[in-house]
Structures are given as structure tokens and as C-alpha cells.
Amino acid sequence: MLSIVLLIGSALALGEYSDALREERKKLEQHKHELLQDLERAKDEYMKSKSSKYAALAIKSLKEKEIRQYNRILRELKGEKNVIRGFNSRSEIEEEIGEDADIIALLRWTGRIDSKTISPFLKSFRELAEDDSKAVVLWIDTGGGSASASRELTEALYNLREKKPVVVFSGGRILSGGYHVSSNANKIVVDPLAEVAYIGVISLHYNKEKYYEKKGIRMRFWKIGPHKDMFYDHRGLSDEERKMREESVKRNYDSFVWYVARGRGMEEEEVRKYSEAVKYLGFEALDYGLVDKLGTLEDAIELAVELSEAKNPAILYLKAGGSVGKKEKEEELIEDEGIYYLPYPEIRRWR
């Protein structure tokens, strides 16, 4: 009899607790809805007047941070068990989760794109294409760089995409060569105020002929071929050489457009509408079909899990050049160029 009374009392207490949780969740969902409405209003105001500092600040104050906190609370209130955890090495994953874990590789990349900086990423892409990881999240912040290096990295990323889902995330910039590469991932997730696209090509030539004359500097070249010294700054370009440079820029531009069209599944003429070297904000890029979703790094990882159909996901943070099978030294993600990135411990406390 006593046990029955205790059971009834426990059931009543649990019912009251569940009602309180439902009420709390209802309030949180309403507040989140209001935040999203404010974000839309700020976006509309910004689109009406791009010089409006108030609108930009309103978006910045609302952008995903607070909403992300409420999403975490909501998931906890709903009692969800599928918490995605982050690790520094495969051995940690196998020790804490087991050998059946579905690894989502997270690779961070910032800085200029050139023949030197892409080398470790080419290595990682090749190895990731052959290992047993389920998906890759590429976390990018770059203003671009060399056209040839961008093409090489784009091809490597596209080959990786053929083997498993690749999701790009940026909270700062994916511009020029950075977008060249990112456009060939399966999906792109960006912050509402991230800078996106900047599709275009530039080539420079410095003519210091008069400067050298003024300083009394004389140069002599021994060359075979009339244009062998056209990239040096001791003289200007001939009409023929100017035409050669212009044709080179146009070929690189056409190549840029083709790669974006291939990666995004768009017609080249559609890409050219947004190829005037304009930096679009994230929500503008979404409207133009240049990205797939507005969100955070968490959203990008969850999308990678969804695309890969991972049942028991675990995040493995890789340094450039690292591989899924190699033990990695723990390294904190830091603030870079004024753009705030989630520190690594946040990934470990995934909710």
C-alpha cells in the first residue's frame, strides 16, 4: 500500500514538473519567435538603406548568439540525448564513444590562398577522401588570393565532395578565391553578416620607369623572347602586352564563373549577374542562391550529420595537414582579425 502511495505521489510530482517544463519551453519558443521577427525587421531596414548603421547594429546584436542559447535550452528541455561531442584525436573518440562512432571532420582555414598555404589542405583533402570519416566541415575565413591556387584547391575539394558530404561554414569572409573554393562544397552555411562572393579577377602591373630614372638606377636584361620582362616594373607595357594581360584576366574570370556555376548548380549567365566583384552580406547571398543557409558553426555541423546520415556522430578537430587517423595536439581556436570564433571548448560542450 505504501509503495502504491509513493508511486502515485511520484507520478503527480513528475506531472507537475513536466507541466512546468512545457510552460518554460512555450515562453522560450515565443521569445525566440520575437527575436527572429526583430532580425527580419532589421534586415528589411538594411535592404532599404544600406548606409543605415542602426540596422546593421540591430542585426549584429541579434545574430545567432542569443538564439543559439535558446535553442540549446529548448533541446535540453525536450530531453534530447543526441549530443554531438568534439575530440582532438581518433583515439579519444574510440575510448569515449567506441569504434562505431561516425566521425565528422572539422577543418579550420584562415588567411590568404597561395601555393604555399594550400599545401597542407591539399594533403588533408586527399586523405579525407580515402578515410572512413562520414563528412567534412570546412570552417573558412579568407579574402582570397591566387587564381591558380584557388583552382587547385577547388578541384581537390570537389573530388572530396564526390566521396562524402562537405559543408562550408563562415562567420567572417568567403571572398574571391575563398568563394571560388567554397562554392564547390555540397552546402554553404554563413553568418547573416558574413561577407560572401566578391566574384572577380584583378591583375596589377607597376611601372617605375620614371622613378628609377630619377634615382639614377639603370637595369639591363638579357632575355630571349620579346615579352620575357613584361612582368617587371622597370618599364611600361606595350599595346600588345596590355591586350595579352586583358585576355588573361578575362580567361581567369570566365574560369571563375564556370567553377561557381558547376559547384552551385547554376547557369553561367545567372552567376554573371552576381559577378561584379560585390561583397554580399550573408542574408543577401542567401536570397541570390550563393549560399544555402544562415546559421552558426553548430548549424553547419548538424547539416553535415544530416547529409551523411551519421547515427553516432563525433566531431574530430583537425589541423591543416592532419588526418582522421593521426593523433592531433589540442589547440584552441582564437579571435582573428576582429572576427569572433567559437573557442574549441564550446564544441566539446555541444548541445
Image (cartoon, rainbow, N blue to C red):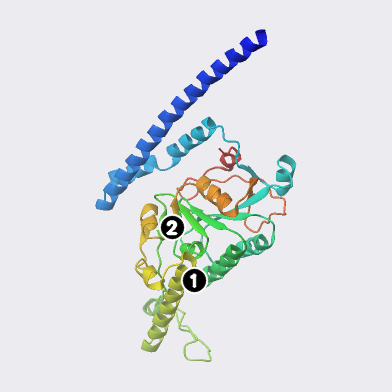
SS label for mark 1: helix
* Residue nearer the viewer, 240 or 293: 293
* Residue nearer the viewer, 123 or 192: 192
Tell me which residue sits at (44%, 79%) in the image.
Answer: 251
Q: Quarter of the image for the N terminus: give it.
A: top right
Tell me which residue sits at (69%, 50%) in the image.
Answer: 328
Q: Position of residue 265 (x, y in %)?
A: 46, 67
Tell me which residue sits at (28%, 48%) in the image.
Answer: 44
Q: Position of residue 46 (x, y in %)?
A: 29, 49
Q: Badge 1 is on which residue?
A: 147
| Residue at the left extreme, as displayed | 48
Tell me which residue sits at (54%, 47%) in the image.
Answer: 302
* Crowd rating for badge 2 (residues with CA inside 10 Å; few <14, some 14–19, many 20+): many
Q: Is residue 51 left or right of residue 21?
A: left
Q: Is residue 310 above or below residue 38?
A: below
| Residue at the top extreme, as displayed | 2
Q: Is residue 5 above or below residue 142?
A: above
Which amino acid type is marked by label 2? Val
Q: Is residue 338 left or right of residue 36?
A: right
Q: Residue 283: in sight, yes or no?
A: yes
In terms of sequence position, does the residue under pointer 2 or pointer 1 come before the other?
A: 1
Which amino acid type is marked by label 1? Ala
* Residue nearer the viewer, 301 or 338: 301
Q: Position of residue 93 (x, y in %)?
A: 70, 44
Q: Is residue 306 above or below residue 26?
A: below
* Crowd rating for badge 1 (residues with CA inside 10 Å; few <14, some 14–19, many 20+): many
**Total numbered badges shown on the rendered structure:** 2
- The reply to whether the C-beta atoms of the residues labelled 2 and 1 are less than 8 Å apart is no
SS label for mark 2: loop
Q: Badge 2 is on which residue?
A: 291
Q: Quarter of the image for the C terminus: give it.
A: top right
Q: CA distance from mark 2 to mark 1?
A: 21 Å
